[in-house]
Amino acid sequence: MSYQNIEQCLLDLEKHGQLLRIKEEIDPFLEAADIQLKEFEKSGKAILFEKIKGSRYCAASNIFGTMERCEFIFRDTLPRIKELISLRKDPMNALKHPFKNLKFGLAAFNALPKKVASSINNFDEINISDLPQLQCWEKDGGAFITLPQVYSEDLNQPGIMHANLGMYRIQLSGNEYVTNKEVGLHYQIHRGIGVHQSIANAKKQPLKVSVFVGGSPAHTLAAVMPLPEGLSEMTFAGMLAGRRFRYFYHDGYCISADADFVITGEIYPNETKPEGPFGDHLGYYSLKHPFPVMRVHKVFAKRNAIWAFTVVGRPPQEDTMFGKLIHEITGDAIEQEIPGLKAVHAVDAAGVHPLLFAIGSERYTPYAKEKRPAELLTLANRILGTGQLSLAKYLFITADEKNCPDINDSQAFLQYILERINLKRDIHFQTNTTIDTLDYSGTNLNEGSKVIFSAYGEKIRTLNSEVPKCLQNVNFSKTKIIFDGVIALQTIPFSNYENAEREIAAINEILKNKQDELVGTPMLVLCDDTDFIAATINNFLWTTFTRSNPSHDIHGINSLIEHKHWTCSTLIIDARSKPHHAPPLERK
């Protein structure tokens, strides 16, 4: 079904028993977010808030809250798009069955954005302060747009076919922003708008930006779709919507004709203001940093406009469904792009970018008697140089063996690696490199390190299912097994790296001659709370991989450097909270 706007989508969901209407007035400060979080937790309905305090506009959330609902919303176009993407694997098959594939002509036609006559009269001109001022977490710096579609154009190649549509959070109030005249625009590295702003800066010109909210749900998903650079997201939006993306220009700004709300403005070269804090999708507050400030030109709203929003936080949340839906749409597109790659999985429970699993091929030396990673290292470097996969911090990679577990089963996959990894050979660091903007485990904003754990060959150890005696005798406040082969050690709080080195040295002194007992325990995790980290696999993934910087926080028993390669006999990851980390999100 082709929805022109959020209202049509919500009415269709209501018709099928998938909408919760809340008629009472709801406070935009925390209350609306709390309702959304609780509804998502129980895999509940989409929500329409009919009265938001301080605004005349309704608001809607949890629209994408379950995969079943996402597939229902895009039920008429999703199968066709998946088929269309699959054609790239076997283009000759499409030529052999031309009549069967005629249906793709309509999808291709819908991909072409349609410039229409100006319909600005369908919008009212309003102020930023008229919008629902939703604040989702107590320590957020103000109200934010959490489902924005941020549109920008390439000044060297103007026009919609070279434009970028991205989901970059917008801060509407707070900090030093001049009310109704300025908003904050936060975008992370490896984003298309950064390319456009760099071009505008080089020309010493402001970058015109339009922020859309609402419209077809397909437009929202298009804003997070990882398309190749230079391919307009509006083409995908049209295909997924089953309706061409309609637009016109007003005062030199592109306007989505179907959007519920539009904010237009300019970003001037080198003009920033403090943006944040903001409760983000890693489960922490991203802190206050200088980001581009957008000088507001005009703000528009349809007369029946509905404000679409979501709440992000420690995964899984509603935005987790975006990732699942994107994976369902693209299938093995990444694997097709990287020869030899069989499967890749960004682990949502760890915040997506901090932890990546991969299965590849190992074909370099099939004649060799010893199985060891070779092609896997080539693939690992290719992965860490590809698009947003390059933001991965921990990469665990193995080859496509018959007994390799499901890559989506985090515990089984990690145990498979740990049973086979040679700790003296198969750990590879990349230091002083880029990491995710939202990851505060590194040395500075966007700066940190990466590590590759590669494993190939026969099983070389049986993982311990109990805490070895040598660890029971060490003076930790608590020691607990997380799962076979991985043990949590609760110790004193982290103070600084100088003290941490001494603490690790003391542990090493006690355990360096205990390898017979530790052979089945390849990974130790230092933490602040063993009960929490060992309670669930998701707690382990979130704590360990969001709170450690490989170059600074990976240590080892009997560690040494041989010819610039780091080795150890037992791995130690220091996953304690550090003073420079962002504070975790907490619900009241």
Image (tube, grey):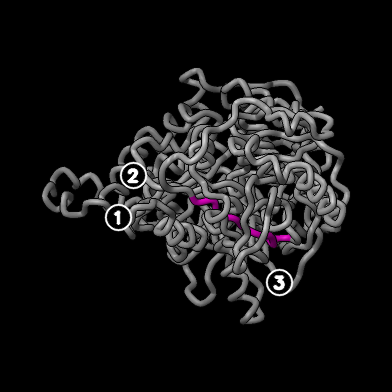
CB atoms at circles 3 and 1 under 8 Å apart?
Answer: no
| Amino acid on which the number 2 mark rests in the picture | Ile
Q: Is residue 285 left or right of residue 122?
A: right
- Mark 3, residues whose alpha carbon is within 10 Å: few (<14), some, or many (≥20)? some
Q: Out of 352 and 496, give the one closest to the viewer.
A: 496
Which numbered disc, 3 or 2, marks the residue that appears first in the sequence? Answer: 2
Q: Dot 1 corresponds to which residue? A: 366
The type of residue carrying mark 3 is: Tyr
Q: Is residue 134 above or below residue 366?
A: above
The spot of residue 439 in percent (x, y) is 69, 52
Determine whether the residue tagged by mark 1 lies in a helix, strand or loop.
loop
Front position among marks 3 and 1: 1
The quadrant in which residue 26 appears is top right
> What residue is shown with label 2?
81
Q: Tag 1: residue type?
A: Pro
Residue 311 visible: no
Q: Quote the CA–CA distance across marks 3 and 2.
A: 38 Å
Q: Earlier in the sequence, mark 2 or mark 1?
A: 2
Q: Is residue 246 above or below residue 63?
A: below
Residue span colored magenta: 445-454
| Crowding near the residue tagged with mark 2, few <14, some 14–19, many ≥20 C-alpha atoms within 10 Å | some
The quarter of the picture where residue 543 lies is: top right
State the residue position of label 3. 268
The CA span between labels 3 and 1 is 57 Å
Q: Residue at x 65, y 41 (%)?
A: 515
